[in-house]
């Protein structure tokens, strides 16, 4: 699939540093001679991070409703400790792109992502966030995939994905974080 | 009122208007220059004040634009469609947002997507697209090789 | 505590008082001047309390005076701030030098 | 009277607040009202609605045969180009060239689960499965090939 | 932006609310000029979810384009699809089987309830009460289950097709709906206990965001928002479609014009929808669920306009056909767009909190506005 | 009565015996510091998980239940995550004040712990103006919030901070007046004295309706003073995204978060002390045998039990009510709480002077 | 030196340092924060002198009230992000000289004077005493000042309202006009 | 000397907070980008500085409540001795409150406690 950047997006992206491929943020630095203690601490930190993914309240369209449903009583992602939805990116860990990203929104999304404190993760929920989905062809304003704007960790196809699908994605993401995988490793590993 | 009756009323009100039966509602064609005046009259029409502008849009006919105004009288529940033909190279029409306040956003949208200039509009800026967008996407000849992937 | 003589506390309050004086002289902004005045009032308070405590331990008058001073400081600050805000509204400045040119 | 009104106000306000607290208190103490379904634990018992549209699949029988003739009706019906049919020409035993499906490309990342393709398919070769656990870490994995390798057209399907 | 700074008086604060803001339910961007906490001006900036659906539909066939409309006002997806299907049917001049009509109306009303329920929860959440949101989702989920069972999707159903509905009702449908009705009857009084009767809530809503009848008409406000100001504008009553003229239900009108009136209209409207469902659920006629149509639909040359009443107001679908398989021009008159235009009018002079309350009662769905 | 006094004296004795006085004092200080930090950490962990569970049950869902047994490690995970999260400082901010603000809030929360009697004879500093001290120190935290809000250089923060400034200054009045109505009865500001004066019954029951009224006012006012819903205007999520701590992340945010919970704990502890007898077991007049049975329950359990009950009450409010508007919030204070508590105080004075209480 | 005196010197240094910062810093918000610290330091001094009641009053009134009010007035009247103009050099030099001279003079005066306590009773402040004396009408009673204070505060309040409301009315009307 | 405990508590608070912040400073290495330091305002660049002159609607409230606050301070000593002084204390407070209430009524009448 050819990757088309929109004009506005392109100028925006070239004006700032392209952070598409960067180091895995929030890495625990190597301390020489750490040895076994450090790995244990690493494990602890990864465990904590994976179990406390606070999402940013970011929902642009229809998928946002299913995201709300996951927050709702029947599916209840608070069981995993994810219910602390923060309205400000400074305190959020994971940004769930629930909905279409259009050209006008792309800089906003990028800014929100940039403003998040490390470590941060991104979940693209729904066809729109993955690729523009229903609005891939013959539209002039839709970004064809949120990963043109910010790096994405997990993709959930569906339009909208079921609440369980989002939960499945969160669990797999959790799993990867627990194993201390970087974004690149995740991409290759599955 | 039936369409015939509305036709009578309106032809009295606007002698220059032309009529056309397309679709279920009465279609009225008005010259762009007369439009503001006609709008005022329609709004204050005694028999059926068309006080409710429920739809405002534009159609690109490749040779010309047609502004389409859907009006309703909330007292008699009659609907009419007013069509104003515009020049395609220089589409300009008077704004009606002082008559129907809801028209303000509608007109901005039409300006944004078709490039129709609404004279005396208080705040004619792009509404839906970014301010630096080039072109008017709902025109039939709009080409955008970067954003639009043709199926 | 007894090792600290009264004079030391008085030195402290003197210092504080003159800091306030310095602020009052150099600042031209009414709010900061008000702040300097508060500092001076506080140094006076310290004096009252210290004298009461060291010299007249059987009485409470110094304490009462300082409480009253605190109260009056609050009233003064409230009125002063109301005036400052009012002044700002009419002159768009709270600089004393601008205010001195005020015409009545 | 002013005072009476005032007290009535206060009383009414307190009452309305207590009613609300009574309601939430009821739920706090009545755990049987909890409606949460614990997703990853209930996977075995989770029944999806049979009409639920989770993804497009092509049914293959035990002989690795499917019913797709490669007629491209689904491709045309799909509103957003999710399906690409790549055809090849089989040589039938009689030596005739026959159009057949080579690859049924399905972009899961584009699919809107609208079901129009299934409606359009004349041979009911494809249908909507009610699976939903598709999340991946790599977008490329979402482009799928629906006909299994070496699968053949079912006999008798035209 | 630069002139905006110049325009404002000293002491004013310009604040962006949105596009990513919990209260805008999506990506509405409001630029608010504040004096202290008093709102001097609210300027909506749209387009953060403008997905060019109108342009896209020009290249989709009449069967295909319906799916994209469920992504507009996704909370009343059925009703959107219904409007499109009706317009196409109007163009084709087909008569729809009675069973399909009843199914459509049932689905519409269920959607309306689901939509109002979500709105109710979100509204309460905007005002800072979180619990109602979860309670509203309980009822909403049971509607979603019904939808999923019959239509195959929870939110964007794409169930209406030109000529009827895509599939027949699921055999469970009637039972499920009846269970839902029972649940609803059991729980509806809690809505009053938790929110409506609450003194804090009433104080926040009453006298806030006043919209007069004249202003409502002039701004083109429709739906519950206008009915809260006493404008009779229920399309189901005024220009009945399908079988609405045979049904017994009331158009809810409140005359206060404030946020609380709009709130009450929606709450009472849910009861009316329940009434409609009760009338129909046991009387679904047998027969076809879909009229026979051609595989490729072609509308005759002409213009077709159809009004329906969505959960948010009057949705108009305007199709200009040149006789081809795709529409020449399609325009959705979305209710949210007009409702939004009165936002500045009703919030001026209020507080930020009032803005949230008034915006909540307008029940904006942003993709519906931006399309 | 079971008490921790013997334990503390034991430790103190041992310290003074084995070490020279200066070192003993130092050790004591260290022990106090460590205990305070431990209490902080423990309270943070417990209250956060409690809040989430309460919220979940009220909202007909399960709440955290997958991290550790029954989700009990959820807040631990959150804490570790927050510690290991990058702490941002915005470029435009006043860096010094921005970083100072969480410390101020934290110090205030810590300082207020000093006079609280956790159990019989178990408090850090039995200050003779206990209650006044608490209300004085806790009024400093508004400065921390104003500082955080201003220095972030963010409009939401500033608005939130100013709201909270006005709110906290004004609600201090009602807190003060309702506290006073108990002081009138006890005639002492010392927390230990206040507890002891409830030897034969808690003030809430002993002093009839006026006590009940001042209890209600107290709960409302402290909810407002701690910026909790329905008075959480300073961080009103739907209006100001996250209010004064919009720009804070990582540990600095966690400190605000923690301080909020500690403050709740403290005001509830004060409420429990004033109205529910602090660590005093439930006694009824002269029913000696009943009182004896009650005495078997350790005093710290009484204290924490009462405090947590009040905390639960405040949480219950939060998950039930919508938020007030700013002007309504201040209206509530001056139109209802203040006049009522003034009248109530006069009535209470009458009760106290005439000895009409039990 | 005992611990108590060390603490005294720490407190004194804290008060003076923050006081100096409060009058010299050019960021007005910071100045108010330094002032606040200085006031808290004075409260700490009262604590150190075992005048807990006074310390609490100091904190309640100054920190909880006056400083908050000052901060509000800063928000209202000043672009709080800007630095204040540097004071005129001559003036600051002059002020510094005057202050140094004054300080020296007074310090010398104090150190020359020999303060003698009038009695040897140990000073002990408790709220009870204050209350008793405050409500006392007999010798050294403060009942009258107590009531007077309430009158004073009433006057201050009315004054504030009169002053502040005057401009507010104007504001309100202009605002009304602006929205029409 | 009890006040020393206050210092201990302050030290504990500082240790606690500084410790936590330091861990993140040492171990967590964040990515840098030009957007990160900008003020967050719903993802839109801010217009104008918040550090501007700004109309606080509630300063008048703060003003009035400050005065009440001061009065409250006087009531603590009063409250402590109510029982000893007896009925005079009641009259005291009634007079006191009456004066307060006058101010209150004045403020109310003037509309000072009404929101602008
Ligand atoms: S993927 Fe589908 S449901 Fe999700 S936002 Fe896009 S159109 Fe809406
Ligand atoms: S379900 Fe819809 S979108 Fe998906 S492949 Fe079929 S027709 Fe295309
Ligand atoms: S799946 Fe069906 S419609 Fe599609 S190519 Fe195969 S036979 Fe044709």
Image (spheres, coloured by chain):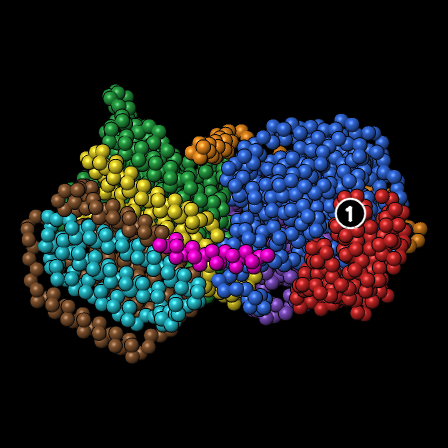
Image spot of residue H24 (x, y percent): 41, 58
| Depth order, front residue of E30/F127 | E30
What residue do we see at 63% from left, 47% from top?
A: E211
Q: What residue span does the magenta drawing correspond to?
A: G159-180
> Quick one: which chain is orange?
D
Which chain is blue in the rendering?
A: E
Which hue belongs to chain F?
Answer: green
The chain letter of the red chain reads B
Quarter the N terminus of chain E occupies: bottom right
Left or right of G17? Residue A87 is: right
* Position above or below: D64 against F253: above
Foreground of the two, D17 or B123: B123
Specify whether residue A118 is in view: no
Residue C54: % across, % down:
11, 54
In the image, the chain rendered in brown is G
Q: Quadrant of the C terminus of chain E?
A: bottom right
Q: Is residue G25 above or below residue A123?
A: below
């Amino acid at each position: 699939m050819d990757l088309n950047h929109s004009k506005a997006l392109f100028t925006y992206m070239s004006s700032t540093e392209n952070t598409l491929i960067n180091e895995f943020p929030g890495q625990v630095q190597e301390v020489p001679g750490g040895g076994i203690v450090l790995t244990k601490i690493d494990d602890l930190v990864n465990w904590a991070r994976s179990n406390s993914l606070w999402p940013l309240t970011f929902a642009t369209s229809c998928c946002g409703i299913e995201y709300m449903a996951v927050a709702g009583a029947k599916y209840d992602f608070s069981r995993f400790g994810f219910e602390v939805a923060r309205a400000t990116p400074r305190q959020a860990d994971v940004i769930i792109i629930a909905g279409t990203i259009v050209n006008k929104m792309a800089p906003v999304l990028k800014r929100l992502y940039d403003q998040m404190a490390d470590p941060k993760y991104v979940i693209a929920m729904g066809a729109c966030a993955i690729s523009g989905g229903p609005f891939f062809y013959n539209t002039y304003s839709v970004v064809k995939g949120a990963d043109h704007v910010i790096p994405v960790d997990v993709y959930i196809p569906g339009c909208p994905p079921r609440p369980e699908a989002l939960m499945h994605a969160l669990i797999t993401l959790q799993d990867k974080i627990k194993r201390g995988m970087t974004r690149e490793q995740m991409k290759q590993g599955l | 009122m039936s369409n015939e009756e509305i036709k009578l009323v309106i032809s009295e009100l606007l002698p220059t208007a032309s009529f056309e039966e397309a679709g279920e509602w009465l279609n009225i064609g008005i010259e762009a220059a007369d439009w503001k005046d006609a709008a005022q009259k329609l709004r204050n029409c005694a028999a059926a004040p068309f006080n409710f502008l429920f739809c405002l849009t534009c159609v690109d006919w490749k040779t010309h634009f047609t502004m389409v105004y859907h009006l309703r009288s909330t007292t008699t529940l009659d609907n009419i469609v007013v069509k104003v033909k515009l020049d395609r190279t220089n589409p300009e029409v008077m704004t009606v947002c002082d008559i129907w306040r809801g028209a303000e956003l509608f007109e901005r949208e039409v300006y944004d997507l078709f490039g129709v200039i609404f004279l005396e509009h208080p705040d004619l800026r792009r509404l839906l697209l970014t301010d630096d967008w080039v072109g008017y996407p709902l025109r039939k000849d709009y080409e955008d090789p970067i954003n639009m992937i043709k199926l | 505590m007894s090792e600290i003589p009264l004079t030391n506390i008085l030195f402290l309050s003197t210092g504080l008082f003159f800091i306030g004086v310095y602020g009052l002289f150099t600042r031209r902004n009414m709010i900061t001047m008000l702040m300097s005045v508060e500092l001076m009032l506080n140094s006076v308070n310290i004096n009252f309390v210290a004298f009461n405590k060291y010299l007249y331990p059987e009485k409470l008058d110094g304490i009462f005076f300082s409480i009253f001073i605190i109260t009056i400081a609050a009233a003064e600050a409230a009125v002063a701030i109301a005036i400052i805000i009012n002044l700002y509204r009419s002159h768009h400045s709270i600089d004393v030098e601008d205010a001195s040119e005020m015409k009545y | 009277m002013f005072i009476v009104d005032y007290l009535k106000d206060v009383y009414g306000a307190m009452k309305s607040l207590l009613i609300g607290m009574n309601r939430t208190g009821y739920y706090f103490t009545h755990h049987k009202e909890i409606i949460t379904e614990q997703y990853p634990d209930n996977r075995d018992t989770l029944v999806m609605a049979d009409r639920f549209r989770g993804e497009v699949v092509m049914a293959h029988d035990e002989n690795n045969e499917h019913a797709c003739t490669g007629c491209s009706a689904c491709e045309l019906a799909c509103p957003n180009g999710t399906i690409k049919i790549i055809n090849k020409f089989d040589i039938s035993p009689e030596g005739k060239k026959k159009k057949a499906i080579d690859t049924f490309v399905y972009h899961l990342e584009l699919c809107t689960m609208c079901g129009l393709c299934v409606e359009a398919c004349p041979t009911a070769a494809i249908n909507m499965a009610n699976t939903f656990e598709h999340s991946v870490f790599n977008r490329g994995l979402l482009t799928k090939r629906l006909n299994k390798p070496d699968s053949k057209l079912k006999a008798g399907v035209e | 932006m630069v002139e905006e700074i110049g325009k404002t008086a000293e002491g004013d604060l310009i604040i962006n609310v949105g596009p990513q803001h919990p209260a805008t339910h999506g990506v509405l961007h409001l630029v608010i000029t504040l004096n202290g906490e008093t709102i001097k001006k609210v300027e909506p900036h749209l387009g953060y979810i403008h997905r060019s659906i109108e342009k896209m539909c020009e290249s989709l066939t009449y069967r295909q384009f319906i799916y994209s409309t469920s992504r507009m006002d996704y909370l009343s997806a059925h009703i959107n699809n219904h409007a499109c299907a009706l317009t196409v049917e109007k163009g084709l001049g087909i008569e729809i089987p009675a069973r399909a009509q009843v199914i459509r109306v049932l689905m519409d009303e269920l959607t309306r309830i689901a939509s109002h329920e979500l709105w109710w929860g979100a509204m309460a959440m905007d005002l800072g009460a979180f619990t109602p949101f979860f309670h509203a989702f309980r009822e909403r989920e049971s509607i979603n289950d019904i939808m999923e069972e019959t239509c195959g999707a929870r939110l964007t159903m794409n169930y209406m097709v030109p000529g009827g509905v895509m599939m027949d009702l699921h055999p469970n449908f009637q039972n499920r709906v009846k269970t839902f009705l029972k649940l609803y009857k059991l729980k509806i009084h809690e809505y009053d206990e938790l929110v409506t009767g609450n003194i804090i809530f009433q104080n926040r809503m009453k006298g806030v965001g006043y919209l007069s009848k004249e202003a409502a008409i002039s701004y083109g406000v429709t739906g519950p928002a206008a009915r809260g100001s006493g404008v009779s504008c229920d399309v189901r009553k005024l220009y009945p479609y399908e079988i609405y003229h045979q049904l017994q239900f009331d158009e809810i009108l409140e005359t206060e014009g404030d946020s609380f009136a709009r709130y009450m209209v929606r709450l009472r409207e849910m009861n009316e929808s329940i009434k409609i469902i009760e009338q129909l659920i046991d009387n679904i006629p047998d027969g076809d669920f879909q009229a026979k149509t051609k595989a490729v639909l072609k509308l005759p040359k002409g213009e077709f306009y159809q009004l329906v009443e969505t959960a948010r107001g009057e949705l108009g679908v305007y199709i200009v056909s040149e006789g081809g398989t795709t529409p020449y021009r399609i325009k959705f008159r979305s209710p949210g767009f007009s409702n939004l235009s009165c936002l500045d009018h009703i919030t001026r002079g209020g507080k930020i909190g009032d803005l949230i309350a008034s915006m909540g009662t307008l029940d904006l769905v942003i993709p519906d506005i931006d399309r | 009565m079971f008490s921790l006094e013997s334990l503390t004296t034991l430790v103190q004795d041992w310290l003074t015996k084995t070490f020279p006085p200066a070192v003993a004092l130092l050790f004591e200080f260290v022990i106090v510091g460590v205990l305070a930090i431990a209490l902080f950490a423990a309270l943070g962990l417990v209250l956060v998980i409690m809040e989430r569970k309460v919220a979940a049950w009220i909202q007909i869902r399960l709440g955290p239940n997958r991290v550790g047994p029954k989700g009990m490690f959820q807040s631990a995970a959150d804490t570790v995550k927050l510690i290991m999260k990058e702490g941002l400082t915005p470029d435009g901010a006043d860096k010094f004040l921005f970083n100072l603000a969480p410390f101020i809030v934290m110090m205030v929360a810590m300082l207020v712990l000093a006079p609280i009697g956790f159990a019989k004879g178990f408090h850090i500093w039995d200050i003779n103006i206990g209650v006044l001290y608490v209300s004085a120190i806790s009024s400093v935290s508004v400065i921390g919030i104003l500082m955080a809000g201003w220095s972030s250089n963010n409009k939401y923060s500033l608005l939130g901070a100013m709201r909270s400034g006005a709110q906290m200054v004004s609600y201090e009045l009602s807190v003060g007046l309702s506290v006073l109505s108990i002081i009138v009865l006890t005639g002492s500001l010392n927390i230990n004295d206040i507890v002891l004066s409830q030897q034969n019954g808690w003030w809430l029951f002993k002093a009839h309706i006026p006590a009940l009224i001042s209890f209600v006012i107290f709960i409302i006012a402290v909810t407002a003073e701690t910026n909790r819903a329905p008075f959480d205007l300073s961080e009103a999520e739907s209006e100001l995204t996250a209010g004064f701590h919009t720009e804070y992340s990582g540990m600095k945010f966690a400190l605000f978060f923690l301080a909020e919970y500690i403050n709740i704990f403290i005001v509830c502890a004060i409420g429990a002390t004033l109205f529910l007898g602090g660590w005093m077991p439930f006694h009824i007049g002269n029913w000696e045998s009943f009182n004896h049975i009650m005495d078997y329950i350790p005093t710290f359990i009484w204290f924490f039990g009462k405090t947590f009950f009040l905390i639960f009450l405040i949480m219950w409010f939060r998950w039930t009510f919508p938020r007030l508007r700013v002007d309504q919030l201040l209206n509530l204070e001056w139109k209802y709480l203040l006049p009522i508590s003034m009248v109530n105080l006069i009535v209470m004075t009458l009760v106290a002077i005439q000895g009409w209480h039990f | 030196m005992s611990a108590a005196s060390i603490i005294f010197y720490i407190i004194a240094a804290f008060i003076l340092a923050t006081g100096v910062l409060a009058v010299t810093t050019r960021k007005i918000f910071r100045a108010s924060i330094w002032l606040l610290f200085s006031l808290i330091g004075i409260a700490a001094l009262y604590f150190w002198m075992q005048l807990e009641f006074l310390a609490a009053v100091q904190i309640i009134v100054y920190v909880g009230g006056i400083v908050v009010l000052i901060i509000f007035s800063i928000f209202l009247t000043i672009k709080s992000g800007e630095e204040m103009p540097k004071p005129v050099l001559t003036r600051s030099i002059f002020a510094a000289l005057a202050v140094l001279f004054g300080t020296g003079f007074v310090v010398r005066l104090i150190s020359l004077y020999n303060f003698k306590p009038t009695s040897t009773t140990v000073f002990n402040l408790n709220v009870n005493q204050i209350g008793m004396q405050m409500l006392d009408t007999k010798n050294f009673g403060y009942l009258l000042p107590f009531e007077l204070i309430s009158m004073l505060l009433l006057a201050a309040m009315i004054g504030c309202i009169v002053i502040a409301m005057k401009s507010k009315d104007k504001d309100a009307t202009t605002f009304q006009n602006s929205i029409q | 000397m009890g006040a020393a405990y206050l210092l201990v508590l302050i030290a504990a608070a500082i240790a606690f907070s500084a410790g936590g912040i330091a861990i993140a400073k040492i171990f967590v290495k964040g990515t840098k980008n030009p957007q990160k330091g900008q003020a967050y305002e719903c993802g839109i660049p801010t217009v104008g500085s918040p550090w501007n002159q700004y109309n606080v609607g509630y300063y008048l409230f703060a003003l009035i409540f400050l005065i009440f606050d001061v009065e409250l301070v006087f009531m603590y000593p009063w409250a402590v001795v109510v029982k000893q002084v007896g009925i005079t204390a009641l009259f005291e407070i009634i007079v006191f409150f009456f004066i307060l209430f006058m101010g209150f009524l004045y403020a109310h009448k003037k509309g000072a406690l009404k929101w602008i």
